[in-house]
């Protein structure tokens, strides 16, 4: 549940993520991670709202799942950060301005590369790099990883079988707990943290369109 829904998303299928987002949220809350929990509660609320009032948004996300990869978002954020004034609190106008500069700055870089590097693009001597999750999944699918994966699978299933038999040592190391109930006990506090955060965002000048 922690990995497969996101792998499916990267493969272009968001159904697993949509089906499990509620349970994922409760597991994260139970783990005691308030910042991530706050985001997950917000995202769950958004998904529920979209499902009821704007199913077209979910369809758009589903049809463009690979384009929603946060790798692209982080790349855009990095480009904007390099173009924004360093000693200046950004506003929406700052983001609009830097967004408009990105395409031109990339075109200028290509022109300079062509002039200075005789047409060889910067970094062209290196092999192109895939996203990390694609690279790792490709590595783990190779024959050299088969023994390690088999041993890991056997170890995991042995733990479940021992637990089913009532292994005393295992029970001592992994005391039983209801993570869903633990999450429910913390949910009100996480919602309050989210409400406070949203209110602070509304009062922050960066979100005011000048």
Image: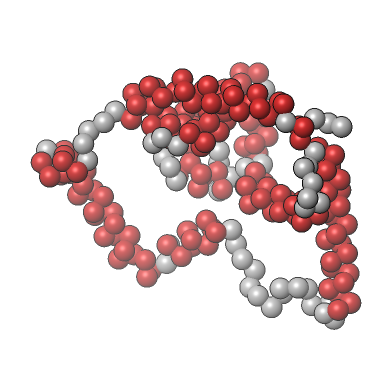
Q: Position of residue 127 (x, y in %)?
A: 63, 73
What residue is shown at x 68% (from left), y 47% (from top)? 73
In terms of image quadrants, where is residue 181? Answer: top left
What residue is shown at x 24% (from left), y 54% (from top)? 154
The quarter of the picture where the N terminus appears is top left
Task: Tell me: 73 left or right of 148.
Answer: right
Q: Is residue 17 visible?
A: no
The residue positioned farthest toward the front in the image shown:
87
Q: In the rendered view, tell whether residue 126 sits above or below residue 132.
A: below
The quarter of the picture where the C terminus appears is top right
How many numbered callouts?
0
What residue is shown at x 51% (from left), y 44% (from top)? 6
Q: In the rendered view, tell whether residue 195 sits above or below residue 12.
A: above
Q: Nearer the viewer, residue 168 or 141?
A: 168
Q: Is residue 74 visible?
A: yes
Q: Position of residue 186 (x, y in %)?
A: 41, 24
In terms of image quadrants, where is residue 173? Answer: top left
Q: Position of residue 91 (x, y in %)?
A: 80, 38
Q: Nearer the viewer, residue 112 or 52?
A: 112
Task: Tell me: 168 left or right of 138.
Answer: left
Q: In the rendered view, tell whether residue 108 sits above or below residue 90.
A: below
Q: Nearer the viewer, residue 22 or 209?
A: 209
Q: In the rendered view, tell whether residue 171 sits above or below residue 177.
A: below
Q: Nearer the viewer, residue 30 or 189?
A: 189
What residue is shown at x 39% (from left), y 27% (from top)? 183
């Amino acid at each position: 549940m922690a990995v497969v829904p996101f792998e499916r998303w990267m493969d272009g299928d968001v159904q697993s993520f949509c089906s499990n987002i509620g349970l994922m949220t409760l597991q994260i809350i139970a783990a005691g991670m308030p910042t991530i929990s706050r985001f997950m509660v917000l995202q769950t609320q958004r998904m529920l709202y979209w499902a009821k009032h704007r199913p077209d948004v979910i369809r758009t996300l589903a049809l463009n799942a690979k384009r929603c990869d946060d790798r692209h978002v982080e790349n855009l954020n990095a480009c904007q950060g390099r173009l924004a004034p360093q000693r200046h609190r950004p506003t929406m106008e700052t983001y609009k301005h830097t967004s408009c500069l990105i395409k031109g700055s990339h075109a200028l870089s290509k022109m300079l590369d062509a002039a200075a590097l005789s047409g060889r693009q910067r970094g062209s001597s290196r092999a192109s790099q895939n996203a990390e999750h694609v690279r790792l999944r490709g590595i783990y699918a190779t024959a050299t990883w088969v023994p390690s994966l088999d041993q890991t699978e056997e170890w995991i299933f042995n733990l479940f079988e021992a637990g089913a038999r009532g292994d005393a040592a295992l029970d001592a190391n992994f005391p039983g707990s209801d993570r869903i109930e633990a999450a429910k006990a913390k949910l009100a506090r996480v919602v309050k943290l989210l409400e406070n955060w949203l209110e602070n965002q509304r009062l922050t000048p960066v979100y005011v369109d000048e």
